[in-house]
């Protein structure tokens, strides 16, 4: 059948696409086969060109066909790689345009299954301006939404800016990262502990200058936005009466003079900040004095003293 297709019997290919492509791959996969089986290789590449022409006209891909083209990438990526990346960009774009989001996310997963292909694909997509927002933003939003918690969000954000430093300059990525983190923090059972983990994890991010950007992750605006959003959420949504003493004493950032620097504290936020710092100083200092309560109102003082003496929540198992 292969040589009939070579003789322009493309109707045979159209009827048996997967069989043809998989059959060709089986012959091309052995070491050196691309050079020794040139005719078969040319048939495969001609089939790829045919499929590429089709999606340029707006057609929707079959995932099984894309898997074949991905598998060929393992064999030859130098000249074929840029073509495959372009093909995948059209494939994802067509899927999203037609509302086929499930197929689009399956394509993203397929791309991610090969690290080099993933790096090449997203490295290209992130340079495409408005098309970048269309193709990348839904992908990273969905990826963060599917995480199991705030720690996983931070790990994903960090890995992406390490792999693609240009994201540190992307306003949309920063907005998506902050939204993804706050969404997961809001669902954490131990909010103070999770915010402490966030602050501590971000501080550990490498300070080594990144290629291309000349920036460091730790000193970027992204880090500041993530840190401030986590602290702001803490002060907005903290339920003081549900704290345990362990949560307070292990949140070491509370002991820093600039613990909430950068936030415009008013009302409930200011009150929660002062009470948290007072509780922390009270239980961490070896010989605390009444001075730890100096910034509290009489109502805040009563709440803190009641909580500190009688009211800490039992440690959750």
Image: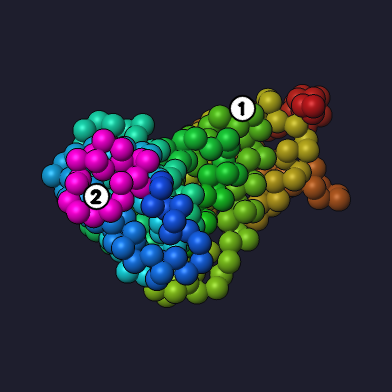
Q: Quadrant of residue 195?
A: top right
Q: Which picture quadrant has residue 234?
A: top right
Image location (x, y in percent) of residue 104? 33, 38
Say whether residue 102 is visible.
Answer: yes
Q: Is residue 209 above or below residue 192?
A: below
Residue 161 vs residue 13: left or right? right
Frontmost residue, 141 versus 184: 141
Which residue in the structure is indicated by mark 1?
239
In this rendering, the answer to whether 32 lies above or below 288 is: below
Report x, y in % for residue 258. 58, 56
Q: Residues within 10 Å of mark 1 (few under 14, many from 20)?
A: few
1 vs 2, front mark: 2
The residue lying toward the viewer, choosing from 16 and 241, is 16
Q: Is residue 271 visible?
A: no
Give the residue at x 41% y 48%.
Answer: 23
Is residue 193 placed above or below 174 in the rendered structure? Answer: above
**In the image shown, does 227 or 177 lie closer to the viewer?**
177
For residue 292, side relative to residue 257 (left or right): right
Q: Which dot marks residue 186? A: none
Give yes or no for residue 281 being in the magenta stretch. no
Q: Position of residue 243 (x, y in %)?
A: 70, 30
Q: Are marks 1 and 2 in contact (CB under 8 Å)?
A: no
Question: Secondary structure beneath disc 1?
Answer: loop
Question: Which region shows up in magenta?
Answer: 1-21
* Residue at left offset 25%, top offset 31%: 99
Residue at the disc numbered 2: 5
What's the magenta bit mostly, secondary-structure-wise?
helix
| Relative to 84, 315 lies left or right | right
Q: Residue at x 76, y 43 (%)?
A: 249
Residue at 24 percent of width and 49 percent of height: 4
Magenta stretch: residue 9 in it? Answer: yes
């Amino acid at each position: 059948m292969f040589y009939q297709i070579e003789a322009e019997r493309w109707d045979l290919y159209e009827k048996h696409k997967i069989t043809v492509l998989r059959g060709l791959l089986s012959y091309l996969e052995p070491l050196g086969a691309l050079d020794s089986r040139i005719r078969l290789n040319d048939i495969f590449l001609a089939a790829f060109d045919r499929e590429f022409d089709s999606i340029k006209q707006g057609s929707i891909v079959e995932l099984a066909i894309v898997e074949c083209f991905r598998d060929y990438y393992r064999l030859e990526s130098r000249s074929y790689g840029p073509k495959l990346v372009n093909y995948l960009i059209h494939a994802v774009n067509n899927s999203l345009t037609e509302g086929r989001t499930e197929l689009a996310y399956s394509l993203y997963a397929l791309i991610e299954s090969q690290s080099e292909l993933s790096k090449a694909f997203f490295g290209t997509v992130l340079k495409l301006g408005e098309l970048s927002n269309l193709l990348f933003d839904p992908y990273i939003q969905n990826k963060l939404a599917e995480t199991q918690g705030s720690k996983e969000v931070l790990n994903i954000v960090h890995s992406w800016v390490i792999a693609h430093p240009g994201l540190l300059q992307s306003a949309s990525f920063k907005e998506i990262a902050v939204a993804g983190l706050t969404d997961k923090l809001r669902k954490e059972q131990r909010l103070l502990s999770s915010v402490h983990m966030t602050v501590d994890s971000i501080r550990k991010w490498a300070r080594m200058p990144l290629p291309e950007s000349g920036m460091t992750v730790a000193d970027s605006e992204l880090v500041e936005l993530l840190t401030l959003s986590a602290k702001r959420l803490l002060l907005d949504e903290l339920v003081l009466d549900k704290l345990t003493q362990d949560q307070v004493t292990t949140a070491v950032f509370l002991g820093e003079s600039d613990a909430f620097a950068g936030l415009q504290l008013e009302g409930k936020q200011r009150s929660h900040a002062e009470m948290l710092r007072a509780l922390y100083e009270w239980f961490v200092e070896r010989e605390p004095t009444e001075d730890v309560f100096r910034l509290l109102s009489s109502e805040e003082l009563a709440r803190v003293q009641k909580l500190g003496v009688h009211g800490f929540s039992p440690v959750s198992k």
